[in-house]
Amino acid sequence: MTMKLTRRLLLAAGVAALLAALKPGRLLARHRSRAGGAARTPTGDRLAAAFTDLDAPREVGRRYLRADPLEASPERVQAFLDEFSDLGSPEALRQDLARLRDRDFRVQDIVFIDGWVLARSEARLCALTVLL
Amino acid sequence: MIEDFRGFEDGRTYEADICIIGGGPAGITIARELIGSRASVLLLESGGREYEDEVQALYAGRNVGLPYFDLDVTRLRYFGGSTNHWGNYCGPLREIDFEERSWVPFSGWPITLKDLDPYYRRAQQICALGRYSYGRERWVELGLDVPAFDPAKVLPNVRQIGPQLNFAEAYGPELAAAENIRVLLHANVVNIQSNPTATSVAHLDIRTLEGKRGQVTARQFILACGGIENPRLLLASNGVEQNGLGNRQDLVGRFFLEHPKAWRMALLRAKSPLALVQAYTDRFHDGVHNRPRWRLARTAQEDMKCLNGEWGVGTDADRQGGTIAARKMWQNLKRGRWPDDLGEKVWRIASDLDDVGVNAYREFMLGEEPIPEFQNVIMWSTSEQAPNPDSRVMLGEQRDALGIPRVQLDWRLTELDKYTKASIAKIAAAELARLGIARAKLEDWLLDPNGSWPDVAGEHHHMGTTRMSDDPKKGVVQGDCRVHGVDNLYIAGSSVFPTGGTVNPTLTIVALALRLADHLKPGYAS
């Protein structure tokens, strides 16, 4: 059954995506380990525990990846992560995300999830929660 | 003087220097401008001073294209024309609207905004509007915070909404008192008779509905009957040229333009929906109401290769709700009119008393615009229509009571029109999200390349059907509004617009009428 993307879900996805942005390097590591068939890492477990709700960003991420499967490639994910100046600093990540969002909206690099308009960076963060 | 053709003897010939066909805003403006000149002016009006069913029925026709308003509802046929029911929503066309744009087929006027600008300023006064101010400075005057949207994408815009202004009531007395102006009511033009080579108008055949006939001769004739009736009369005047007068290039009636409206382009989610809606409600300032909105910047149109467009914020409030019923009732009473369907309105108010009460407090105690209860905040848009030769006014098979073929309207839009709506929605949604004002959920049809545009609607703006171009192969009238190849026939009104921009047309109609009057005056200088 298709999940309807509600306003609550969308906003939750935004929050969760921001949280996810705090640990993108670990998300990528997890993605890589899963791609290699490895077991879930302790880091991944800790990260997952940091989210109050992963359903929303995952739903957004799944829809985004379904529409553009190439976004799941390690190269694209790495390229996205390279856009962040300091993956270790929560404050820097917040600022980078705001910058990326502003840039995306300015150049119309937007995606549509069930009609909702998201900056591509927002959608990519949500996609990372699926790849986790 | 104002007289009634029905009171004169049959078969009479009326003479004038200038004969104006149509007593709407264009015709009245030109006649008024000629007061005191040496020109004897005869203004022919089909209707009388009041609405009459049998006269209005002459406007009936068929819609054979996109769903459109009934053709005898979307305009009024009596002295004052459609100013008898208009809302006096006004604004000027923008610079880009006059330009030839490579991505908009058939675009480009032979005149520029600079040519029209002085006339817009005069038209502003004639339409009883405020200062000639429609941009950012107007928002500041209104006390609005101007969001920091990217000026390369969208720009602040305002529609001025003047008082209810019936041109016949406002300016009829001046015409009545003028020695050189004669208004003939109930004088229907049934034929524009040209000379044998169709290079000039010889006379007009006029009739009353009762069968009285007459003729009008003049040095110059001005057709000012509106965007649907102007082409109808030219097409029906086919005694000399089979395709109608001024129609050697088969352009008369083609390129019918509207302002396609999408009432709901997107659902908007904001932290404070009420504050967002309030920012876009009318403000009374400078003697007029002002309605804030946004328009696409030139660079956005160039980058997106789309048409001009506007968007704003509204709600999905029930149009049948008590607050709207109460407002309509109050507006009628203020004008000394007893409201239509009074019982129904009272019932709607009674069954929605809480919302009516809140909004009465808002309007009368706080001086704010009422905001009827709503569920959702929405983004709406109105936009320019792409000129399209297949969107057209034609003559139908049936005839009206005067024997003139009834009109057939085939309103059509193109892919560019839908693409423009999607472009407006995407730009607006991105800017709203970028500034954290609101998130938008676009309607499905905007995102589906194959999706059809539901509930497409016009705005009672009939334009483009005798378009202006200096090239006779591309236009019916030249830059001075004279019909190509017909040396004494001019056209006034929105039918001469080659493109329609995004604004309500009357201010431009009046501005062009002033310009045409200025063009004619030197021949009759006192």
Image (spheres, coloured by chain):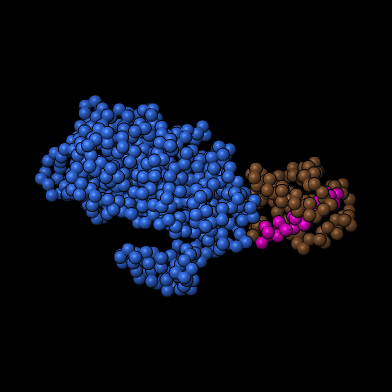
Q: Number of labelled discs?
A: 0
Instruction: Pinpoint residue B25: horizontal percent, then vertical percent.
Output: 31, 47
Instruction: Pinpoint residue B289: horizontal percent, then vertical percent.
Output: 43, 57
Question: B149 and A47: which one is in front?
Answer: B149
In magenta stretch: residue B512:
no
Question: B76 and B3: which one is in front?
Answer: B3
* Visual hue assigned to chain B: blue
Tell me: A3 left or right of B398. right
**Which residue is depicted at the point 76% across and 59% down?**
A54
Residue lying furthest left: B9
Residue lying furthest front: B526
**Which residue is depicted at the point 54% across and 47% down?**
B155
Question: A94 and B82: which one is in front?
Answer: A94
**Which residue is depicted at the point 43% across and 56% down?**
B286
**Where B100 sits versus B319, above or below?**
above
**Where B288 sits versus B411, above or below?**
below
- The magenta region covers A8-30
**Where B224 sits versus B279, above or below?**
above
Q: Is the magenta stretch mostly helix, strand or loop?
A: helix
Q: Is residue B231 visible?
A: no
Instruction: Pinpoint residue A91: horizontal percent, then vertical percent.
Output: 78, 54
* Visual hue assigned to chain A: brown
Q: Is residue B334 visible?
A: yes
**Which residue is depicted at the point 56% across and 59% down?**
B276
